[in-house]
């Protein structure tokens, strides 16, 4: 196996997190290698729903990161060199019962206090904003900044930007072990990469890389199902979600409607095998039709599944790894498409010794020594 040394940083994992960190480190003057076992942004980062919701960050502390991420996707032509289909459509989040209405008011008040420009609106006003809505909502909230971008464009965009910034991009490079070597690391993949620092950006697959460094973290995963309809005449203009979180839908420019909301399929990141759970797909589609009746006759063109990581406190793990000098983690970012470009820059700035725009999320709160 060949050996390539002299890197300042080896970034393991080429999703939106790894690519963003690597890009900013390379532009900050570091010699960077990105090691991705498949292609850049082919897992969660390239198959997600693309929703940029300022109403649904999983924790109010993530609101400034979501606003920052949205702004970076809006301006991706400037910093990434490629437009990624950003659209600002405005989003409605619906409550169908009085209990849900109460939950909506609390959820939105917390996120509004954290900086999201959200207004709670009556059901009648919601139908004025989106005439495609059914009569079922009893209350709603609206945020004009909500929108989406096209995650399938990320791989090509980051590949070009990383190469342009002088980073070494190694795709189809499965990392099989990381060892200490001198005052840095030897990262074993298609070659042995010697680097002073290592960034783990391995998403739901972070357990094994952490173990190589003698560490463990409670990074869980969910198996999210998605569906897309055939092309239709315009049935809905706004982004539609529900306060319970189990519906997210949008009609994109080509007329297809993307429908998700965290309904679970079968699958495990270890094997990467997945299977659609039919009753969950039907539940998701019924929910979509309950919100937007014109979806009733829509035929589904395609379904797919992706793995999404999570942490017990719903906050990411972003920063230096405890007890492993020179090693960093960026994982557990639940709405990682939205916050990814911003939080990746936050980590890169802190590695470069610059003051990040927002604080990191210290992994030490959840990362422990691996049981021997
Ligand atoms: C179906 C679905 C819908 C979603 N919808 C939204 C949404 O609408 N809005 C939103 O904000 N977020 C959404 N998300 C979440 C978002 O996509 C993720 O939070 C984000 O993409 C995570 O990025 P990542 O770089 O951490 O992980 P990933 O994209 O999973 O990247 C990790 C990479 O590490 C690589 N890797 C792992 N182990 C190794 C190894 N040993 N060697 C080399 N490479 C390795 C993998 O191949 C992978 O490419 C969705 C997720 C899913 C699955």
Image (spheres, helix red, strand yellow):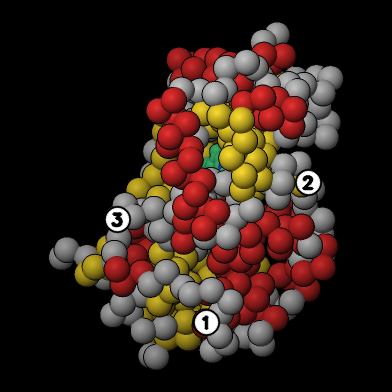
Give the Cα distance between marks 1 and 3. 24 Å
Q: Which residue is located at x 66 percent, y 45 percent?
A: 143
Q: Which residue is located at x 70 percent, y 8 percent?
A: 297
Residue 218: mark in rendering? 3
Q: Position of residue 85 (x, y in %)?
A: 79, 48
Residue 171 in the figure: left or right of residue 108: right
Residue furthest to the top = 297
Q: Position of residue 321 (x, y in %)?
A: 36, 75
Element class at badge 1: helix
Element class at badge 3: loop
Q: Are marks 1 and 3 in contact (CB under 8 Å)?
A: no
Choose top left, top right, bottom left or bottom right for residue 169. Answer: bottom right
Q: Position of residue 49 (x, y in %)?
A: 63, 39
Give the Cα distance between marks 3 and 2. 35 Å
For marks 1 and 3, the one nearer the N-term is 3
Give the Cα distance between marks 1 and 2. 30 Å
Q: Which residue is mark 1?
A: 350
Number of disc labels: 3
Q: Position of residue 18 (x, y in %)?
A: 56, 65
Choose top left, top right, bottom left or bottom right for residue 298. Answer: top right
Element class at badge 2: strand
Pointer 2 local density, CA inside 10 Å: few below 14, some 14–19, many at least 20: some
Residue furthest to the left = 372
Q: Which residue is mark 2?
A: 87
């Amino acid at each position: 196996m060949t050996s390539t040394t002299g890197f300042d940083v080896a970034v393991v994992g080429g999703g939106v997190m790894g690519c963003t960190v690597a890009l900013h480190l390379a532009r900050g003057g570091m010699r960077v290698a990105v090691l991705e076992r498949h292609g850049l942004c082919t897992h969660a980062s390239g198959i997600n729903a693309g929703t940029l919701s300022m109403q649904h960050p999983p924790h109010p502390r993530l609101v400034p990161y979501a606003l920052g991420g949205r702004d970076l996707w809006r301006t991706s032509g400037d910093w990434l060199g490629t437009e990624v289909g950003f659209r600002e459509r405005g989003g409605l989040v619906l409550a169908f019962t009085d209990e849900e209405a109460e939950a909506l008011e609390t959820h939105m008040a917390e996120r509004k206090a954290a900086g999201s420009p959200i207004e709670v609106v009556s059901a009648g006003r919601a139908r004025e904003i989106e005439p495609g809505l059914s009569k079922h909502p009893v209350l709603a909230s609206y945020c004009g900044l909500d929108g989406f971008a096209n995650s399938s464009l990320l791989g090509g965009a980051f590949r070009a930007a990383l190469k342009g910034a002088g980073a070494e991009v190694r795709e189809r490079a499965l990392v099989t072990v990381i060892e200490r070597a001198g005052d840095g690391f030897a990262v074993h993949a298609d070659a042995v990469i010697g680097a002073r620092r290592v960034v783990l950006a391995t998403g739901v697959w972070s357990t094994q890389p952490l173990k190589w460094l003698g560490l463990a973290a409670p990074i869980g995963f969910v198996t999210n199902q998605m569906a897309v309809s055939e092309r239709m005449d315009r049935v809905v203009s706004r982004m539609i979600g529900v306060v319970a979180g189990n519906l997210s839908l949008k009609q994109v420019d080509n007329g297809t409607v993307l429908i998700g909301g965290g309904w679970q399929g079968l699958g495990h990141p270890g094997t990467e095998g997945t299977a659609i759970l039919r009753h969950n797909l039907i539940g998701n589609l019924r929910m979509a039709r309950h919100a937007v009746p014109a979806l009733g006759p829509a035929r589904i063109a395609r379904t797919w599944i992706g793995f999404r990581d999570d942490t017990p406190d719903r906050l990411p793990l972003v920063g230096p790894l405890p007890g492993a000098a020179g090693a960093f983690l960026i994982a557990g970012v639940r709405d990682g498409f939205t916050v990814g470009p911003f939080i990746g820059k936050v980590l890169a700035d802190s590695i470069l010794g610059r003051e990040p725009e927002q604080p990191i999320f210290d992994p030490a709160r959840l990362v422990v020594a691996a049981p021997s």
